[in-house]
Each structure stands twice: as structure tokens, then as C-alpha cells.
Amino acid sequence: MELQGRRVIVTGAAGGIGSAIAAACARQGALVAAVDRIEAAIGPEDGLPAEAITPFIADLTEPQACSELIAEVGESLGEIDGLVNCAGVMRRGDLLEVDDDDWAVTFGVNVDAVMRLCRAALPSLIAAESGAIVNIASQWGLQPARGHIAYNSSKAAVASLTRSLAVDFGAQGVRANSICPGEILTPMLQQKLDDNGIAESELASTIPLGRLGRPSEVAELTTFLLSDRASFISGAAIEIAGAQQVGS
Ligand SMILES: NC(=O)c1ccc[n+]([C@@H]2O[C@H](COP(=O)([O-])OP(=O)(O)OC[C@H]3O[C@@H](n4cnc5c(N)ncnc54)[C@H](O)[C@@H]3O)[C@@H](O)[C@H]2O)c1
């Protein structure tokens, strides 16, 4: 119960990785605000109290959504001391294939909403004296995958934004880290495999550990980074990718 008494926002909580993170935070004792633009069966598992996970519906790309969300969660659960930005979208294409809309949508969710939510949450995180931010970036932000320029660039921006936060607000007790997952088996990835006619085993064979990652493994790293066990880890961009190298 290393997050006992903590109040944590998790975005993208209806998705594969976000739902695993929300559940893991709740299992570790946190009160979780589970945020997504779509309504889904986000709720506590058996054995967890009903109040462990509270759903909030918001499209984080709406101009006022982030500040309104922080205010709403503060009123309902109390001031937060943890923020996990996991909501994300992917548009494929190289620079001659993506248009301005692809770029704007990708950066709107993956970067602008993360920036706005961090900004809106910072007063609470500073007041908490041990506030922690975990932003879910991507291994592709560190090693670009072919044909995904908007997504790769947005995730590189997330890692850099996170390091900047760590540098600027470390003196006020705020830690900020990004997690850079490789291939994690979620509905988002399954759809990509189906669309391209790729078998899971084929992708797994490109990963030295011989399998795809699990959402629960990203969730495990997230709860660790939120907790006091990671008290001197800040400004890091941590790969969780089974030693896979992204090919060019
Ligand atoms: N699955 C992977 O292999 C993988 C690898 C690297 C990074 N990631 C990152 O991990 C995160 C989660 O990925 P996933 O595979 O669970 O994807 P997913 O599509 O299952 O979940 C993403 C969630 O974000 C929500 N969302 C999107 N736009 C939103 C908006 N404007 N406002 C509020 N919510 C919004 C979606 O509704 C969805 O529930 C993403 O940031 C993704 O880029 C995933």
C-alpha cells in the first residue's frame, strides 16, 4: 500500500495502459480520479472500496478542460499529489503523408493536453511537498519508428517537457519522470496488428525478451515512480521495452 492516502489523476483511464495504471494505483491505496473522453466501465475491482476509483469524463483537448478537471477533482477528492498523463493518440505517416490536421490532433492530445494538465496541477503538487508526475511517452520518442513522424515527435516532446518540469520544480519538491514503453499489448496495438496483418508472434520475435509487454508491467513502474520509493528519481525517461531496438 505504497500510495496510501495519496490522490492521483490518471488520464486515458479507459484505455489499455491507463486502466491498468488506475487499478494499480487504487490497489496501492490511492484515491484515483480516472479520466477519459469516453465512458467506460472504469471502476474498482473486487476487494477495493467503491470510492477507490472515481470516473471523470473530459476531452482534454478542450481549451478549459484541464483547469476545470483539476478544480473538479480537488472539490470531489481533495487536492492531488500525483498526476499520470496516459491519454494518447497515434496518426501514422511520414512528413509527406501527414497533413496539418494529423499533426494538430497528435500534438493536441499527446503534448498540449499534457502541458496544460501539468500546469493546472502544479499548485497542488507543490503544496503537497512530495508531488509526482508520470507522463507516458514512448520508446518511439527516443528511437523514431519509420512512418510515424507526428507520433514520434510528440512523444519526444513529452520526454523533454517532463525533464524541464523536473528541473524547474525540483526545488519545490515536485518529481517528474516519463515512461517510454515499447510494444505493449493493448487494444490500440492489437488494432495496429490487425490492420497490418501482423501476427503477435511475429512482432514478439523482434523483441529480445521474446514477447510483448503487458499493461500491468507499465502500471507497476508507474506506481513505483509515484511512490516515495522513487524519491531521488526525477527527470528520467525510462524505457520499458524488453530491450527492443526500433529499426530504421
Ligand atoms: N500500447 C503501446 O504499445 C504503447 C507504446 C508506447 C506508448 N504508448 C502510450 O501509452 C498511452 C496509452 O496507450 P494505450 O495503448 O493504452 O492506448 P489506448 O488507445 O487503449 O488508450 C488511450 C486512451 O486515451 C484516451 N484519449 C484519447 N484522446 C483523449 C482526449 N482528448 N481526452 C481524454 N482522453 C483521451 C482514449 O479514449 C483512450 O481510452 C498512450 O499515450 C500511448 O501513446 C502505448
Image (cartoon, rainbow, N blue to C red):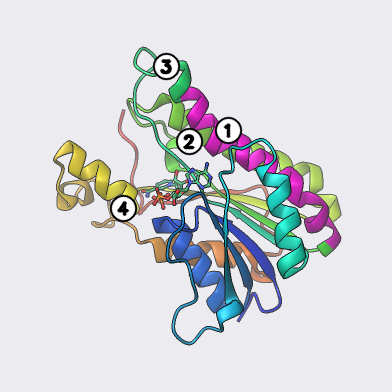
* Residue on which the image places disc 3: 99
Tell me residue 39's x, y (percent). Answer: 46, 57
**Mark 4 → mark 3, Cα distance in angstroms:** 25 Å
Residue 48 location in percent, x, y? Answer: 52, 83
Relative horizontal placement of residue 207, taking residue 150 as reference (left or right): left
Binning the other alpha carbons within 10 Å of mark 2 as few (below 14), some (14 to 19) or many (20 upward) gives many
Q: Main secondary structure of the magenta part?
A: helix
Three-letter code, disc 1: Ala
On residue 7, which mark appears? none
Residue ID for mark 1 = 157
Q: Position of residue 150 (x, y in %)?
A: 45, 26
Label 4, on which residue?
A: 187
- Range shown magenta: 103-127
Real-space CA distance between mark 4 and mark 1, rounded to the nearest whole angstrom: 24 Å
Q: Position of residue 134 (x, y in %)?
A: 61, 54
Is 97 left or right of 238, judged from the image as shown? left
Q: Mark on residue 141?
A: 2
User: Which residue is rendered at x = 80% and y = 42% of the image?
Assistant: 168
Q: Is mark 4 within 8 Å of ligand 1?
A: yes
Rendered position, 52 above or below 158: below
Amino acid tagged 3: Asp
The residue under the point 31% across, 55% down is 185
First in sequence, mark 4 or 1: give its number.
Answer: 1
Residue occupying image coordinates x 39% and y 57%: 16
The alpha-carbon separation of the residues under discs 2 and 1 comes to 8 Å
User: Answer yes or no: do the residues labelled 4 and 3 have beta carbons within 8 Å?
Assistant: no
Q: Quadrant of the C terminus?
A: top left
Q: Give SS at disc 1.
A: helix
Mark 2 touches mark 1? (CB < 8 Å): yes
Q: CA distance from mark 1 to mark 3?
A: 19 Å
What amino acid is found at the position of numbered circle 4 in the picture? Pro
